[in-house]
Image (cartoon, helix red, strand yellow):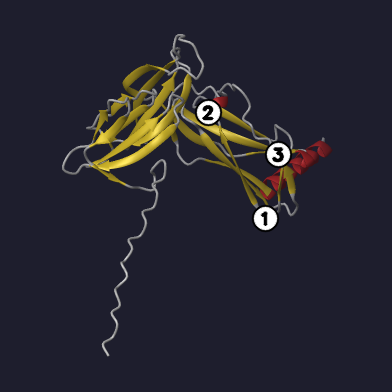
């Protein structure tokens, strides 16, 4: 019995030493997400073992577990892709970034905890991070637009594929109202949930669809500033610009050729523009005429 007890103590001390030599931490840039929004996490692995670690050769070297507020494990829909071998030298830190949303059934709003486990095959050890909490929010629908997609090249006059653009608002951290775009098909399959940005409570978004079925959204995000964004039917951001209320309020206008443009207001170039604004050339100073000296 004594030998068993000593063995258990030795194993506990050994595992404690391993954990102190190599640490695993899960971090996130934000703590609240709308249902269906990308859920990026970063796993930081710190190596203080005095030897290089070879990681990533096996598909299960890094795994994740998510549980809800009741402690029940959330069902997986697949395994996050983490393969890719690398060497982590001693005294170095490696970071692996993964989007967990496609691989867990986070269908209910509420509080969740995520843990990451790193398996070191050469040591026959597994190291698990401390749990990190995050919230899944349920947004309020502001409006919904259903559109058909333009036919692809060479296609016949078949029934068009349907997209639904759904604008939602959610109260981020109970301090900031945010506008989101949810793109689905006719049956509710979600293609993407995109956080468009902060918005003011007293302004309603102005959405319009152009001839290519792209969604244009203009909404107020400040006392006198407006955000203008354009998305394609896959939910990909094509354009982001900022306009200020000057002598008139910016608004969307449909043109005769099926395009949509912003009229009124004054555009303000920012570092968040998509695509990035081209730098303006510096003004040139005309060369001064040199007159010959009088003899």
Residue shown at 32% from the left, 36% from the top: 228
| Separation (CA) of disc 1 from disc 3 | 18 Å
Q: Earlier along the polypeptide chain: callout 2 or callout 1?
A: 1
Residue shown at 21% from the left, 38% from the top: 264
| Near-viewer residue (25 or 253) | 253
Quarter assignment of residue 212:
top left
Quarter assignment of residue 144:
top left
The spot of residue 42 in percent (x, y) is 56, 40
Q: How many C-alpha atoms fall within 10 Å of the one at disc 3: few (<14), some, or many (≥20)?
A: some
Q: Marks 1 and 3: which is nearer the front?
A: 3
Q: What residue is shown with label 2?
A: 101
Residue shown at 52% from the left, 32% from the top: 113
SS for callout 3: loop
Q: Earlier along the polypeptide chain: callout 3 or callout 2?
A: 3
SS for callout 1: loop
Q: Residue furthest front?
A: 295
Q: What residue is shown with label 1?
A: 91
Q: How many C-alpha atoms fall within 10 Å of the one at disc 2: few (<14), some, or many (≥20)?
A: some
Q: Earlier along the polypeptide chain: callout 1 or callout 3?
A: 3
| Near-viewer residue (271 or 72) | 271
Q: Is residue 43 left or right of residue 238?
A: right
| Near-viewer residue (28 or 113) | 28
Q: Which residue lies furthest to the top in this view?
A: 158
Q: Is residue 147 visible?
A: yes
| Separation (CA) of disc 2 from disc 1 | 32 Å
Mark number for residue 56?
A: 3
């Amino acid at each position: 019995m004594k030998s068993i007890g000593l063995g258990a103590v030795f194993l506990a001390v050994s595992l404690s030493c391993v954990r102190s030599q190599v640490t695993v931490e899960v971090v996130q840039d934000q703590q609240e997400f709308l249902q269906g929004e990308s859920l990026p996490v970063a796993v930081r692995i710190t190596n203080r073992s005095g030897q290089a670690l070879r990681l990533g050769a096996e598909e299960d070297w890094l795994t994740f577990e998510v549980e809800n507020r009741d402690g029940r494990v959330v069902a997986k829909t697949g395994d996050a892709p983490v393969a890719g071998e690398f060497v982590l030298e001693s005294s170095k830190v490696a970071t692996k970034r993964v989007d967990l949303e496609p691989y867990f059934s986070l269908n209910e709003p509420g509080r969740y905890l995520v843990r990451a486990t790193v398996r070191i095959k050469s040591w026959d050890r597994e190291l698990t991070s401390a749990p990190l909490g995050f919230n899944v929010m349920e947004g309020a629908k502001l409006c919904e637009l259903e559109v058909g997609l333009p036919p692809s090249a060479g296609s016949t006059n078949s029934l068009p594929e349907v997209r639904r653009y759904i604008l939602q608002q959610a109260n981020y951290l109970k301090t900031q109202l945010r506008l989101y775009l949810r793109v689905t098909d006719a049956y509710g399959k979600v293609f993407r949930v995109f956080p468009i940005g902060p918005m003011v409570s007293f302004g309603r978004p102005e959405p319009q669809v152009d001839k290519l079925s792209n969604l244009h959204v203009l909404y107020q995000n400040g006392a006198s500033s407006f955000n203008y964004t354009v998305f394609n039917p896959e939910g990909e951001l094509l354009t982001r610009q900022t306009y200020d209320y000057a002598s008139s309020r910016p608004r969307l206008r449909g043109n005769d050729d099926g395009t949509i443009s912003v009229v009124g207001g004054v555009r303000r170039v920012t570092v968040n523009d998509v695509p990035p604004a081209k730098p303006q050339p510096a003004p040139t100073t005309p060369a001064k005429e040199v007159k010959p000296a009088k003899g």
